[in-house]
Amino acid sequence: MNSTIQGRREGDARARLGMELASLKKERAIKMAQTAMLNAAMDRPERTCTSDDISGDLASEYDDGGKWVGAAVRGLALARVIEKTGHAVSARPSRHANEVKLCRVRDDANAAMYMQALRLWLQRNPLPEPAITNSLFPDLEQSQKNTPSLRWA
């Protein structure tokens, strides 16, 4: 086989793998964030939560910038699990005391079922171990060291 064709096929395979891993990682981040928000809300008598509830360490910044955080909140709202009730001042230093949405669980039973579905999805869709992807593409190991990851994933 022509080395150019073989190189192109290998490059295409690596690109597909990278896109699939990135997609899965983002989807996992969103579902883990939703689980964290719902856990926090269900622990409070008023059943409220904000995006600050996603991370256990408010002082830390998300390794990947956290651009998916809004999708986590929006997903819960579109599923009618939470609703916006106002605003709160973020306690995250990286947010510079900006406002975040204050949300409330609409229905405890619905939230519990949604959390169960999230946990089930997370169990069934683990991220592959780095050793697996590195055995498929040995020189990806160095590029994965430079890839941002979630601190709490």
Image: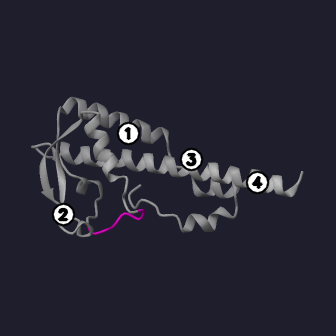
Any mark on residue 98, and which?
2
Residue 143, percent from left and from top = 60, 66
Residue picked out by circle 4:
8
The span picked out in magenta is: 59-64
Image quarter for residue 131? bottom right
Mark 3 or 4, nearer chain start? 4
- For the residue pair 120 and 101, the one nearer the viewer reads as 101
Q: Could you tell whether 65 is left or right of 49 in the image?
A: right
Residue picked out by circle 1:
119
Mark 2 or 1, nearer chain start? 2
**Mark 4 in CB contact with mark 1 (< 8 angstroms):** no
Residue picked out by circle 3:
20
- For the residue pair 148 and 3, the one nearer the viewer reads as 3
Task: Kindly tell me whether residue 109 is visible in this rendering.
Answer: yes
Task: Kindly tell me whether residue 128 is visible in this rendering.
Answer: no
Residue 15, percent from left and from top = 64, 53
Of helix, strand and loop, which one carries label 3? helix
